[in-house]
Image (cartoon, rainbow, N blue to C red):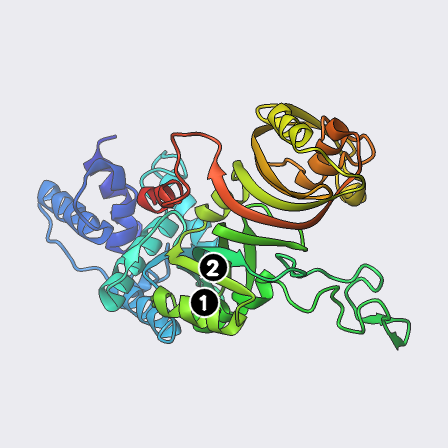
Amino acid sequence: MSIIENARALAAQEPLCDACLGRVFANQSFGLTNAERGKSLRIAVSLADDTPHEPVDTTACWVCEGACAEEQFDSWAQRCATAVTDTEFNTYQVGTKTPPLIEENETLLRESIGLQSDAGELFKSEHNREVGKRIGQITEKTVEFGRPDIQFTIDLAADSVNVDIHSAFVYGRYRKLERGIPQTEWPCSACDGSGYQGNLACETCGGSGYLYDESVEELTAPVVCDVMDGTDATFHGAGREDVDALMIGTGRPFVIEVFEPRRRNIDTDRLEGDINAFADGAVEVEKLRVTNHEMVERVKELEASKRYRADIVFDTPVDVTDFDAALTALTDATIEQYTPNRVDHRRAAITRTRTVYDADGTIEDPTHATVEIHGAGGLYVKELISGDDGRTEPSLAGLLETGATVTDLDVLGVYAESESESFEDDTYFRTVDASS
């Protein structure tokens, strides 16, 4: 059957609105709404049959039951826009839960002329588009089909609009300037973070539920959450340093994810100042900017080398010549490290192979020295120095044949493993924003 013949057969199934008629032939022409397409087909049928064209009552359609009326699209768009009047957003998407009866009617309509049930365009797609473009006109925001700031879900049967506010993300670098601060909250293992053992306050954490009073997360994320008016926030770091280590130099990349934010268009320079004031010298942040969800994956999966500075105490006096020779032996060396004693309760028991790119240092006196180590990501520096009872080979202690203990450890920088990528100016991380 020709298009005109099919249109004639469908138009005879009154009452049928222009949109439901036109939607069956949505893939046959472009640049028209389904209602315009349906009206044009009716006119074409009228001309072919030499009969007058009669306007159609869109509210009485047996397929969509009036849901495709222009005033219905307008109403849903206004309801969606009203639902987010107190929420900042730049992009949105619309979804529709189609009542089973409308889905069934659509199938019957197409099958009545021998077409497949998904011929043309489905009601859901038209409803999303027509409501969506009206929301854009009202709010002056942009439709985004990937990961929008706002997701509207229209439930026709329930006569309701659900608004899903997607997370916002802030990227930056932090420096940790005090020891004894973990990167993220550290729940007490003795009480499983409850703060209680039985009916009594946990003796291990003093009833707080945490092993440490502060963390980088607690000194940064709540401020971002407050400024963006979110319900909660979580911290994603590019690796982590030991609790007793400083993170200085160029800082460590991180992303703070804010859930259900009511504000997105923030002044990141001011936010930086707010965080630094709140952290009161324990933590500093810089290079803050609003980014997208892809940055979380990039930061968390970052393979980066790191430079450390360690203060060391030797068990017995060390000769300067032997010390220099040991550092030379470690430079460009391949290190085999079996899971260290201090982390074997939370790490897989395997042997890891890592590279030391550079090792340098100075002897302060026969039993005290300072070294700088530039190593591949995942290198356990404390164990590289101490030997960890033979679990790390080679090690500084092993080469010097004496015990060696790290008294202070600082992370000086996080660098690209590849020379083609630069972390210093954050070019590597800006590629995410540029491609989004």
Mark toward the start of the polypeptide (1 vs 2): 2
The amino acid beneath tag 1 is Pro
Q: Quadrant of residue 399?
A: top right
**133 relative to 325 in the view: left or right:** left
- The residue that appears at 37% across and 70% down in the rendered structure is 270
Give the residue number, with chain letter if any, for mark 2.
Answer: 167
**Is residue 375 something one can see in this rendering?**
no
Above or below, 196 against 19 in this view is: below
Dot 2: within a 10 Å radius of its alpha carbon, few (fewer than 14), some, or many (20 or more) residues? many
Quick check: 160 left or right of 239?
left
Mark 1 surroundings: few (<14), some (14-19) or many (≥20) residues within 10 A: many
Relative image position of residue 315 (x, y in whole percent) = 80, 41
Toward the viewer: 215 or 116? 215
Mark 1: secondary structure: loop
Disc 2 secondary structure class: loop
Which residue is identified by label 1? 261
Residue depicted at 32% across the width and 51% down the height? 126
Which image quarter: residue 67?
bottom left
Q: Could you say which is closer to the camera, residue 223 or residue 34?
A: 223
Q: Measure how far apart labels 1 and 2 are at the Cα level.
A: 7 Å
Query: Left or right: 179 with respect to 95?
Result: right
Q: Amino acid at mark 2?
A: Ser
Q: Quadrant of residue 398?
A: top right
Which is nearer the eye, 426 or 197?
A: 426
Question: From what the image shows, is residue 389 above or below residue 37?
Answer: above
Residue 15, given in percent of the width and then of the height, sits at 30, 57
Q: Nearer the viewer, residue 180 or 99?
A: 180
The quarter in which the N terminus is drawn is top left
